[in-house]
Image (cartoon, rainbow, N blue to C red):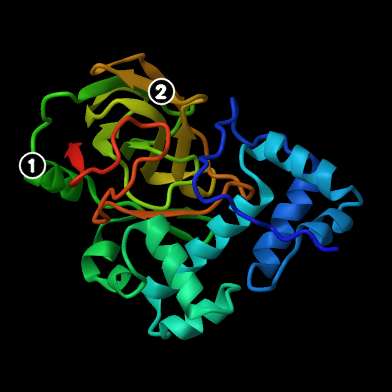
Amino acid sequence: MKHRLAVPEAVAPPIRSAPMLALQPAVRQAIASMHARYFDPITLTELAAEVFVSPFHFSRIFAKATGVTPGRYLTAIRLFEAKRLLLTTALTVSDIVCSVGYSSVGTFTSRFTRAVGMTPTQYRDPEVGRLLVALAPNFRRLPSLALLRSLGKSCASATTGVGGIAGQVVMADGAPPADVLVGAFSEAIPQCGPVAFTGKTNTGTTELEIPGVPDGDWVIMAVAEHSASMGGTRFSTGTVAHPVRVRGGRAERFVIGMRPPLPTDPPIAITLASPTHQVGHRAHVSRRPGLRSVA
């Protein structure tokens, strides 16, 4: 019997204590296979057979190395490709559904809407693309700092009962100056916008605060676009090694060490125009009316 890559809908993935810098060859090969065949009905058994291990052992080593299950990783690739096609092509939703490995438009639309916070058709709004943050080998975007500042001024000020998370973003040695977006997300591979974010120019090591963060356990993630190439890339990324807990408006400090994107990183595409419709099972609030940001 084939094991389907089932994806739990309500359980957020664990956060790894280190980025995927030294993955096992079997995990690297499986990730490459997912990227090459995401439009096919890939099964867990098939992926495990390709790397000559049992499905159980494969699932265990994959989750240990990446922090997410093979099913969640494959879903991230498919949703990313769907978002990219929605924003950059005139393909119909039906055509996109077939292109990213789904057989039912209804099933895809339901899953997309639940994960992203808007329907595939709504995702084609120009504002979504204008405020897109994307990080993948062939598709990288970050709104300008001026746009982030403009958005920050238009957002409501923090309300009673929410606090800020202070921390530090550290660039790699010799990295050129960069515009940096740092956000608090409910998942390790976010599909919708952060519950709060901030944007700054970073010239090495920068102190900052993410204001308006509700109580909960949050994944703190940063994406930076550099003013000049850095080892062949203009972008870098980083994630706090563990979820940052906010309780009663108070939180521990965080430190994010930035690095160039890796081919094995899960692709990410979120829009700051997206409503933060859900904050994950670890938070103490179930719905946010909108983004809180500052630049």
Q: Position of residue 261 (x, y in %)?
A: 54, 44
Q: Quadrant of the C terminus?
A: top left
Query: Which residue shows up at 35% across the image and 27% down it?
Result: 216
Q: Which residue is mark 1?
A: 153
Q: Residue 40's image quarter?
A: bottom right
Q: Is residue 254 visible?
A: yes
Q: Secondary structure at mark 1?
A: helix
Circles 2 and 1: CB distance less than 8 Å? no
Q: Amino acid at mark 2?
A: Val
- Quarter of the picture holding the N terminus: bottom right
Left or right of 167 in this view: 19: right
Alpha-carbon neighbours of circle 2 within 10 Å: few (<14), some, or many (≥20)? some
Q: Please name the residue shown 70% across and 36% down the image.
A: 65
Tell me: residue 123, above or below residue 141. Answer: below
Q: Which residue is under mark 2?
A: 244
Q: Quadrant of residue 44?
A: bottom right
Report x, y in % for residue 75: 57, 58
Q: Which badge, 2 or 1, is on the more N-terminal residue?
A: 1
